[in-house]
Amino acid sequence: MHVVVTGALVENGAVLLVHRSPTRRAYPDLWDLPGGHVEAGESELQALAREMREELGVHIVAESASRLGDLHAGSGADAVHLGVWHVGDWVGSPTNRAPDEHDDMAWVGISELGDLPLVHGGLAALLRSLPEPDRLSVPRRDEARTAASPSGPDIHGP
């Protein structure tokens, strides 16, 4: 079984999604939350922090992270256990630091998730379960992020 962790960075009612490159072996050409495999000896939260740093160049505030739920896919040796986390605060501006894995990234309104081809069908429902204050427009504390903050339904990374 593969153990994978993903992080939902939510800002102004939108969640940051990454588009998996069409050349990926697993789940090509689909939208997903950023994240990756939990390595031996890592907790899910440690893996989440590492993956957010590697893929987006952001440092999550660990105390702000809370588990949204779990999703499962596949069976046998191909089974995937996916831990989905909500990241309430982070430092840095998200950028695509893994262009070999993701060919695009976008802020997508939580209410618009059903319009996209997502890796996991249950992902939209988990994100819609966020408490209302987490889904509403809340100004971020980190002023350095202003340029990367969503001003509309989506922005794209390099």
Image (cartoon, grey):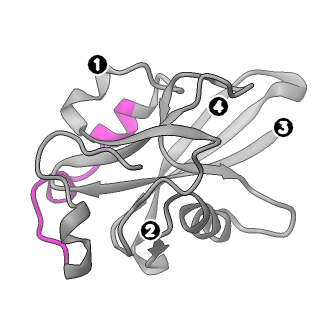
Q: Dot 2 corresponds to which residue?
A: 65
- What residue did someone put label 3 on? 1
- For the N terminus, give its image quadrant: top right
Counting residues from the start of the chain, the first of labels 2 and 3 encountered is: 3
Taking depth in this image into account, of 146 and 33 the one nearest to the observer is 146
Q: Secondary structure at mark 2?
A: strand
> Residue tagged by mark 4?
72
> 66 or 62: which is nearer to us?
62
Quarter of the figure with residue 55: bottom right
Tag 2: amino acid? Ala
**Magenta residue span:** 124-141
Q: Secondary structure at mark 1?
A: helix
Tally of numbered tags: 4
**Crowdedness near tag 4: few (<14), some (14–19) or many (≥20) residues, C-alpha within 10 Å:** some
Frontmost of labels 1 and 3 is 1
Q: Is residue 32 above or below residue 27?
A: below
Residue 134 horizontal side relative to residue 1, left or right: left
Whether pointer 2 and pointer 4 mark residues with C-beta atoms closer than 8 Å, the reply is no
